[in-house]
Amino acid sequence: MSGNHLLEIKNLKIDVRVTKKRRLSIVDTASLIIEPGQIIGLIGESGSGKTMLCRSLVGTLGRRGAYIASGQLKFDGIDLISAKQSVWNEIRGKRIGYVPQSALAGPNPVMTIGAQLAEAILQDENFPKADLEKRSLELLNIVQIRRPETVLKQYQHELSGGMKQRVMIACAIAQQPQLIVADEPTTGLDVTVQAEIMELLKQIRKDFNTSIILVSHDLPLINEICDDTVVMHAGTTVEKIPSKSIKASKHPYTLALYNSRIDLVVPKGQLKTINGQPPSVGSWPEGCRFSERCDFVKDKCRVKQDLPLITIGTSHETSCLRYDEIAR
Amino acid sequence: MKLLVYAMTKLRGKNTVNIIEAKNVSVIFDSYGDVIKAVDQVDFVLPKGQTIGVVGESGSGKSTFARVLSGLQLPTSGSVTFMGKPIQSGRNTYEGALRKEVQMVFQDPYGSLNPRMRIVKAIAEAIRQHQGLDKKASRVAALDLLESMGISNLDAQKFPSKLSGGQRQRASVARALSAQPSVLIADEPTSAIDQSAQAQLLGLFNDLIKKGLSIVLVSHDLGVIRYLSDYVYVMKDGIFVESGKSEEIFNNPKEDYTKKLISSIPGRSIK
Ligand SMILES: Nc1ncnc2c1ncn2[C@@H]1O[C@H](COP(=O)(O)OP(=O)(O)OP(=O)(O)O)[C@@H](O)[C@H]1O
Ligand SMILES: Nc1ncnc2c1ncn2[C@@H]1O[C@H](COP(=O)(O)OP(=O)(O)OP(=O)(O)O)[C@@H](O)[C@H]1O
Ligand code: SF4
Ligand SMILES: [Mg+2]
Ligand SMILES: [Mg+2]
C-alpha cells in the first residue's frame, strides 16, 4: 500500500447489532481514496450508507449501535480501525473535522453557541483563553452569521435552520483540520449562502491543502465543486468518476440518479424516478445490488459474489459488468 | 410595494376561496437586548387547492412565519384566519375539529417524531386517531403511505434514530399527511432526500393537490418551488418584498434580491 494517501478506505464493512445475536450489514465493500487537497463528492440514494461511512471516519459509529466488521481504514498512515481512544482524541475534531448531517439538531440544546464554539476552539490546549471571544467571532464571521455578538449568547432553538448549520461548520473548521467530512452541510441554506460556504471550503482547501468529503443530494453543486464523485448504492461504492465527466458515467445507477433531476422537467410535469425502491439493508440481492432495478441487467450480473470496482480510465472506476456496453 | 402585494391578494381572492389568510402579522423576539423582527407586518393568502411557495435567504423569517400559520407560534400582532375564522382564541389555536386540518412538516424532522415509537406505529396511530380506522387497517394504511414515499416495510419497523436522514424526513412528512389535513405547511420537506426520492415525494404531493390539498411550501430548493408552486412569496428581513405567479417570479423577477436569489443557483444544468 502506498503511504501517501491522506485517506484510504478499502472494502469497508459496517455492521449493526440488531439483537444480541443478529447482525446486519449496512455498508459492505465500500472503497475510497482521498489525496491531500482533494474535494470528493459522495452521492447516492437516501439510505445507501453515506452517513455511516462518514461516521466511521470520526469513530462515532458506536453511538448508532454500529461497528466496523472488516476492511481497511487508514488516515495519514494511521490505522483507524484499531485506534484507541487516545488516538481518536488527537484526530477527531482536530485533524478530521465533522459537520454532522443532523446539524439542525446539532448544536447542544443546553449550551450557548458561545460555549460550544469555545469547546471546539479549546481542543487545542495551548490556545490562549484571552483570545477566545475574538476567535469565536472570527469563526462566526467566516461562516457569515449576522449579529455574531448576539448569536454567541443564544441557544440553538433561537437560531434559524441555516444559522445552526453554519455554527456547526464553524465548529468543524475551528482547528483547521486536514480533512473535513461535511454531511449535507448546505441543505436548508439559501443558494447565496450555499455558494459562499462552497467558496469558503475551496478557500480553506487552497490555504491549508485541506481535503474535503462532501455528502450532498445537490448534484449540480457536487458537479461544480468536487474533483471526483463517488457514488454509493445499497451500502457499496459503485462508481468513482471525475465530477466534470459525470455525463460519461459508466454505471446505470449513476445515470439514473442524474436523470431523475427535477430541473429536467416542466412544472407539475411527469417526474422520473429510479426503477423500484432501493433495496433495504438485510435484503440486498447477490452480485450487482442494482440488478433488480437496472434496464441493462443480464444473467451474468447476478453472480454470487460482490462486484469489485474496475479501473476503466483516469480516476474512473465502475463496478458495472457491462460498462463498455451501456450508452446513454 | 406592500400596497401592491395587498392589491394582488385582494384580486386573487375574488374567484377562489382563501383557506388561510394572514393580516398584518408580526413576530418580534427580544433576544439579549437585540430586538429581532423575525416577521414584520406581513399579509398572505393561501387560496384553496393551491400551492404557495415561500422563499428567501437564511434567517429571513420563513420558519417563524410558517409556525404562525400552523398556530404553533402566536404572533406579536396581527391575525390569521382559517376559512374566514380566526385560528386563535385566547392562547389556543386551531381548537377542536380544526386541529387536524392544518399540519406542519418541520425543518428539523427529529422534532416531530416520537423517538420511542417505531415509525409504522407512530403513523398508524395518527391514522387511527384522525381517520377512524381500526388497528389493523391503520397499520396497513401506514405501511402503504410510507411505501408510496419510498420507505420499505422493513425500514418502517425502525425507530427514528435508526433511520437515515432522508428516511426520517419522509417519515415526518408521512406523520403530517396521516391526519389527512386540508392544508400542509411544509418547511424544507425535501432538503435531505435524493433526486429520485424527491421526485417520488413531489409526485405524491401532486396527487394530493389534485384531491384538493392546499400547501404552503418553504424551501431553499428553487427547483422544487418552481415545480410545485402556483404562486411565490419572496421574504427578506421579515417582510415579503415580492410576490407573484410562480412563472412570473422565475422568468421576470422585479426585485434585485429575487434576481440574486434565482441567479445564484449553482450550475443548474450539469456541465
Ligand atoms: N442502528 C441501525 N439499525 C438498523 N439499521 C440502521 C441503523 N442505523 C442505520 N441503519 C440503516 O442503514 C442504512 C444507511 O443509513 P445512512 O444513514 O448511512 O444513509 P444515508 O446514505 O446517509 O442516507 P440519507 O441520504 O437519507 O442521509 C439506512 O437504510 C438505515 O435505515
Ligand atoms: N425563539 C427565538 N428567539 C429569538 N430569536 C429567534 C427565535 N426564533 C427565531 N429567531 C430569529 O428570527 C429570525 C428568523 O428565523 P427563522 O427561523 O424564521 O428564519 P428562516 O427564514 O426559516 O431561516 P432558514 O432558512 O435559515 O431556516 C432569525 O434571526 C432567528 O435568529
Ligand atoms: S452489473 Fe448488470 S445489473 Fe449491475 S448495473 Fe451493470 S448492467 Fe446493471
Ligand atoms: Mg445521511
Ligand atoms: Mg427555517
Image (cartoon, rainbow, N blue to C red):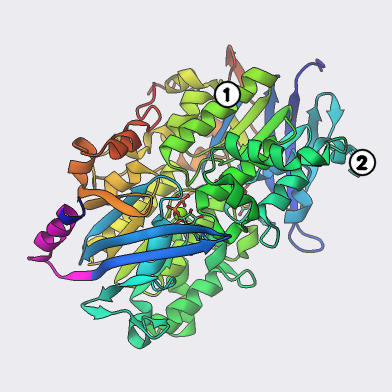
Judge from the rendering whether residue A254 lies leftward or rightward of residue A80; answer left or right: left
Residue A325 is at least partly visible in this image:
yes
A179 or A261, nearer to the observer: A179
Judge from the rendering whether residue A13 lies leftward or rightward of residue A44; answer left or right: right
Figure check: A159 above or below A205: below
Judged from this view, the residue extending furthest toward the front is B33
Q: CA distance from mark 2 to mark 1?
A: 31 Å
B69 or B91, nearer to the observer: B91
Q: Which residue is mark 2?
A: A86
Residue A206, picture quadrant: top right
Judged from this view, the residue extending furthest toward the top is A314
Amino acid type, callout 1 = Lys
- Give the crowd class for mark 1: few <14, some 14-19, many >=20 residues within 10 Å: many
Q: Which residue is mark 1?
A: A202
Q: Going 12% across and 58% down the picture, which residue do you hit?
A: B7
Instruction: Give the magenta range.
Output: B4-19
Q: Earlier in the sequence, mark 2 or mark 1?
A: 2
